Image: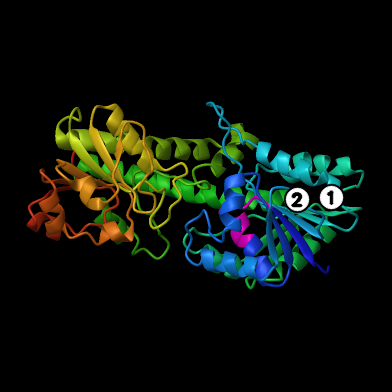
C-alpha cells in the first residue's frame, strides 16, 4: 500500500517518537493528544518526555511541516493508536482499556474504505478483535473487507527508543493476511529490523509473553537475593559464578519492578486466563513485595525507622530515564516515610517529584545534608559514580545501603561507611 498521511493518537513515550519518525521519513502526520498541556508544549517546540535525541527529532519533524499537533484526529490513509493501557483502579488487576476505546471511537467518523488502523497499545489478547474492531465498524465499514486492522507491539527500551524503534524486529499481526501486509507496508517506511507477520491475537500475546518472561526471571533473582541475605551469601558473587554456565543468565535483583510494561503486562495475561497462570501471578507478587523487603532491610540496618533521617537516591523506575510510572523506588520511599522515617528524596531527572510523606530535594547536596543514612534506589549513572568521601562530608551519619549492588564496597568502606548491600548477608527474611 501507498501511504501519504498518518494520524497517530497518543503522543506519549511511544506515540511521539513514532509520529516524529514517520514525519521525518516523508509522511504527513497528524499527532493527536487529548492533553492540552502536551499539545501546547509540542507546539512551542519543546517535549514533555526525557529521551535522548527526541527533542531534536520532534523539532525536525515539526519544522519540516510534516508533523502537525492537534487535539482532534483528521482523515488519513492510516491511523496508529498508541495510548496508555494502565491497570484499573482496585485490587482486581484488570486492564483499563478506556483510552483505547476513546481513541477508537474518535476516529470512527474519519475511517474510509482502504484505510489501515493499527493498535500499538499493549492490550490483553483479543482486544483488537473484540474491542477495537466492533467500535470501528460503527462507521458502517467492515474490518478486513473494507478497511485493514492490525496490532503491532512496541518493543523498545527507554533511553534507546529512537534507535530501537528503527532497528528492532517488528511483529505485525493482522485480523487477516491483507491487514498484516498493509501494516508491514506502513512500518517498512522506517523499520530496518525484520518485520514478522502473524495474526493480531498472536501479536498481542507476544508482547505480554516477552514482559512476563522478564518479570518471572527478575522475581527469581529477587528470591535468590532474599535467600542469600538469610544465609550470609553474597548474591552478586553467586550470580556472577552461576552465569559462567553457558545456559544460565540470571538477572540482577533490586528494589522491585516498575515501569508501564513489565510491572503491568503480566496482569493482562492473568486476566485472560487466571486459572492457567499461577507462576505469573506468584512472580508479580514477589516483585510487588520487594519494596517492603527493602524497607525491612533498612529497618534492621538502622535498628528502627522512627525519626531516622534518610536520603533516598532515585525515584525513576529504572536507571537514566525520567519515567516514574509504577516505580518501586517511590514505593520504598513512601513506605519508609509511613514508618516514621524522615525521608528526603532526590531524582535528578525530576527533582520536584513528590512522594507522600517525603521531602523532595532540589540537589544531591540538599538531599544528603545532615542525614544518618543514604539508600541507593535507582542506579542512575550519576549515582554509580558518587565519591563516597564527598558523600560522607555531607552527611551526619555513616550508613549506606545499596539495593543494586553497584557501589564499590572497598571504596565506601575506606571512606568510613557502614555499607549494606541487598543480597549480601544479614538476617532480613
Name the spot of residue 174 as percent of width and height, x first: 77, 55
Quarter of the image where the N terminus is located = bottom right
- Look at mark 1 in the image and give the residue it sits on: 110
Lower sequence index among marks 2 and 1: 2
Q: Secondary structure at mark 2?
A: loop
Q: How does the figure colour the protein chain or chains?
A: rainbow
Q: Is residue 86 above or below residue 162?
A: above
Q: Is 13 part of what is drawn in magenta?
A: yes
Taking the image as drawn, is residue 257 in sight?
Answer: yes
Considering only vertical position in the picture, is 370 above or below 13?
above
According to the picture, the residue beneath numbered tag 2 turns out to be: 73
Residue at (75%, 60%) from the top-left corner?
6
Circles 2 and 1: CB atoms closer than 8 Å: yes
- Please state the total of marks drawn on the protein image: 2
Element type at mark 1: helix
Q: Which residues are magenta?
A: 9-18
Amino acid at each position: 500500500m501507498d501511504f501519504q498521511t498518518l494520524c497517530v493518537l497518543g503522543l506519549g513515550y511511544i506515540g511521539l517518537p513514532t509520529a516524529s519518525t514517520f514525519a521525518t521519513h516523508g509522511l504527513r502526520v497528524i499527532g493527536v493528544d487529548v492533553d492540552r498541556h502536551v499539545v501546547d508544549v509540542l507546539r512551542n517546540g519543546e517535549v514533555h518526555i526525557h529521551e535522548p535525541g527526541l527533542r531534536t527529532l520532534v523539532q525536525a519533524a515539526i519544522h519540516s511541516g510534516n508533523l502537525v499537533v492537534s487535539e482532534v484526529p483528521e482523515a488519513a490513509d492510516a491511523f496508529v493508536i498508541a495510548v496508555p493501557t494502565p491497570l484499573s483502579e482496585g485490587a482486581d488487576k484488570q486492564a483499563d482499556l478506556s483510552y483505547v476505546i476513546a481513541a477508537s471511537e474518535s476516529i470512527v467518523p474519519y475511517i474510509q474504505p482502504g484505510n489501515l488502523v493499527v493498535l500499538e497499545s499493549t492490550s490483553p489478547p483479543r482486544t483488537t478483535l473484540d474491542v477495537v474492531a466492533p467500535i470501528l465498524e460503527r462507521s458502517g465499514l467492515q474490518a478486513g473487507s473494507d478497511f485493514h486492522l492490525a496490532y503491532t507491539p512496541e518493543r523498545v527500551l527507554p533511553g534507546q527508543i529512537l534507535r530501537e524503534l528503527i532497528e528492532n524486529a517488528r511483529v505485525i499481526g493482522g485480523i487477516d493476511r491483507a491487514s498484516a501486509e498493509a501494516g508491514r507496508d506502513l512500518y517498512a517506511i522506517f523499520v530496518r529490523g525484520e518485520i514478522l507477520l502473524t495474526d493480531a491475537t498472536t501479536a498481542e500475546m507476544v508482547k505480554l509473553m516477552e514482559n512476563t518472561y522478564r518479570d518471572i526471571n527478575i522475581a527469581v533473582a529477587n528470591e535468590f537475593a532474599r535467600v542469600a541475605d538469610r544465609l550470609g551469601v553474597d548474591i552478586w558473587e553467586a550470580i556472577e559464578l552461576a552465569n559462567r554456565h553457558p545456559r544460565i543468565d540470571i538477572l540482577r535483583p533490586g528494589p522491585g519492578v516498575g515501569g508501564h510494561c513489565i510491572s503491568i503486562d503480566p496482569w493482562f495475561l492473568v486476566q485472560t486466563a487466571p486459572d492457567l497462570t499461577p507462576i505469573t501471578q506468584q512472580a508479580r507478587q514477589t516483585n510487588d513485595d520487594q519494596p517492603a523487603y527493602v524497607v525491612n532491610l533498612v529497618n534492621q540496618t538502622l535498628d528502627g525507622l522512627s525519626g531516622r533521617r534518610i536520603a533516598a537516591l532515585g525515584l525513576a523506575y529504572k536507571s537514566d530515564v525520567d519515567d516514574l510510572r509504577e516505580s518501586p523506588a517511590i514505593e520504598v520511599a513512601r513506605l519508609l516515610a509511613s514508618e516514621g522515617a524522615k525521608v528526603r528524596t532526590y531524582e535528578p531527572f525530576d527533582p520536584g517529584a513528590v512522594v507522600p510523606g517525603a521531602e523532595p530535594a532540589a540537589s544531591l547536596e540538599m538531599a544528603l545534608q545532615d542525614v544518618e543514612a543514604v539508600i541507593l534506589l535507582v542506579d542512575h549513572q550519576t549515582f554509580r559514580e558518587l565519591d563516597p568521601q564527598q558523600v560522607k562530608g555531607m552527611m551526619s551519619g555513616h550508613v549506606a545501603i545499596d539495593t543494586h549492588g553497584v557501589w564499590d564496597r572497598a571504596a565506601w568502606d575506606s571512606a568510613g561507611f557502614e555499607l549494606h548491600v541487598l543480597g549480601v548477608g544479614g538476617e532480613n527474611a
